[in-house]
Amino acid sequence: MSTIDNEILLGAEEDAKEVAYILNYIGQENRERFSEDDIYYCLDVFLEYLETLNDTTDPDGYINVDVVAAVRYIEKKAKKEGMGPYDHDALILLVNGELEYSEQE
């Protein structure tokens, strides 16, 4: 197996761990509101949102994230792209789960 194949495999494994963490974080009731594809989509859009915040990095290199604004960004983009609709409160949990997961790293 080539180095690139190994990197892809490791990336897929890490993504699967992240999704499993988020599914656990959001709880059973909210798990039914998202497929794995929905979670991957929402995480991709959330990362896009974070890229728009590069100018708001504090001196320590941290980005202050307004979770509600991030969720609104995801909702708007999902509607535009024909995804969802997603429950607002469930999206807040999903974004908070992603932030918690990222802090562990």
Image: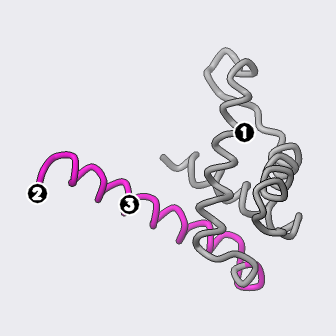
Check disc 2 and report the residue beneath it.
1
Which label's residue is closer to the chain start, 2 or 3? Answer: 2
**Does 10 appear in magenta?**
yes
Circle 1 packing at 10 Å, graded few (<14), some (14-19), many (20+), is some
Check disc 1 and report the residue beneath it.
49
Mark 1, secondary structure of its residue = helix
- The location of residue 23, given as percent across then percent down, is 62, 73
**In-front residue for pair 9/79:** 79
Q: CA distance from mark 2 to mark 3?
A: 15 Å
Residue type at tag 3: Ala
Residue visible at 82% across and 46% down?
73
- Magenta residues (range): 1-30
Tell which residue pokes out farthest to the left in this image: 1
Question: Left or right of 91: which side holds 2?
Answer: left
Circle 2 packing at 10 Å, graded few (<14), some (14-19), many (20+), is few
Mark 2, secondary structure of its residue = loop
Residue visible at 72% across and 29% down?
52
Check disc 3 and report the residue beneath it.
12
Q: Is 104 located above or below residue 20 in the figure? A: above
Residue type at tag 1: Tyr
Question: Within the image, what quadrant is residue 42 found in?
Answer: bottom right
If the image is split into quadrants, where does the N terminus sit? bottom left
Question: Left or right of 104: which side holds 60?
Answer: right
Which label's residue is closer to the chain start, 2 or 1? Answer: 2
- The location of residue 102, given as percent across then percent down, is 56, 48
Tally the marks. 3
**Does 103 appear in magenta?**
no
Q: Is 41 located above or below residue 44 in the figure? A: below
- Asked if marks 2 and 1 touch (Cβ < 8 Å), the reply is no
